[in-house]
Amino acid sequence: MLPYNDFASYLRRRFPFKVQKLSINGGRSCPNRDGSLGRGGCTYCNNAAFSPAYCLEGASVEEQIAEGIRFFAYKYPDMRYLAYFQSYTGTYGDAEQLAAVFEEALRHPRIAGLIIGTRPDCMPDLLLKDLAEMARRGFVMIEYGVESTVDESLARINRGHSFGCSAEAIRRTHACGIAVGAHLIIGLPGESREQILGHADRLSELPLTSLKMHQLQIVRHTQMAAEWEASPERFRLYSPEEYIELAIDFLERLNPAIAVERFVSQSPAGLLLAPSWGLKNHEITARIVRRMHERGAVQGSAVGIPGAAPMSKPE
């Protein structure tokens, strides 16, 4: 049995068939880039670091779905898909136009639901109402970029919103009957170990369905890369062994009802400056699980939060 609540098991409980995320570029920009909220974007962000090759900028939603299915068909011929609007800010723009794009994806016979990545300050009431109606007909999850629960850290990375803004967006979305995910970066500049573990405490108080966390990565062509090259001593980059122990300490303080989708991320080798671990994501996950068994660690065990979702057998 896995000692934590994993997202794959959540999806198996939610769907009677196998599903796979299929990334779609919705053609959105970001208010932290175009001047609506700020310029230059978040200091760590290079969108090329997480855009798959099959995700064709400028192509229609239908064309991107078809290309994504072709990409996965050799391995998963009968797979159903979750349309994943990942690039930039997925809910930034005209609410009616955005709703039409999401409806177009949902109409495809191989699409079983939507996952939309966005900022917590970009969820207008009109669009949230439309998404709530879609959620009554099928699966919809909104994944908010929280990144940190420390306002000083959010200001330092030019995020453009507070943690209070994230908490309010998560509660609003949950109240509409929509599943809510959060994204968190572990090890932002200046954050202490206790502040990092404090993220688990604060997120545990929110009605989250899922959490994606990963280590801080220094990616080429970002403001953070320039800061790191100028003053590397200002950054605390973890070794794999250090990160594994920290991740387990974090899990022990995380509400076990929250399904963990990811522990680490891996930027393309040509873009990644540091840390270079030489390990695949699944290898780090396997080490975390093995070490949790060695330690007798279980998600939520440090705080004794009731209502844990059943842990699952490993794949």
Image (cartoon, rainbow, N blue to C red):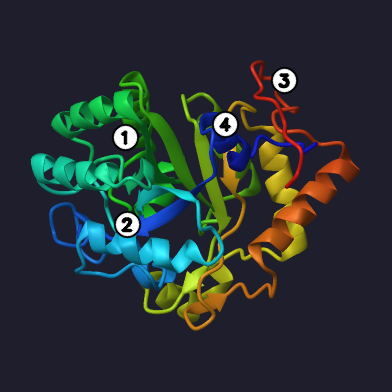
Q: Residue 205, percent across and down?
A: 51, 24
- In primary-sequence order, the first of circles 4 and 3 is 4
**Mark on residue 165?**
1
The amino acid pointed to by label 2 is Asn
Q: Indicate which disc residue 158 carries.
A: 2
Q: CA distance from mark 4 to mark 3?
A: 14 Å
**Mark 4–mark 3 CB contact (< 8 Å):** no
Question: Looking at the image, is mark 3 or mark 2 nearer the viewer?
Answer: 3
Mark 4: amino acid = Ile
Q: Which residue is mark 4?
A: 258
On screen, residue 168 above or below 264: above
Q: Residue sitting at 56 percent across and 63 percent down?
A: 75
Alpha carbon separation for disc pair 2 and 1: 15 Å
Marks 1 and 3 in Cβ contact (< 8 Å): no
Q: CA distance from mark 1 to mark 3?
A: 27 Å
The label nearer to you, 2 versus 1, is 1
Give the numbered dot on residue 304.
3
Identify which amino acid the numbered label 3 is placed on. Answer: Gly
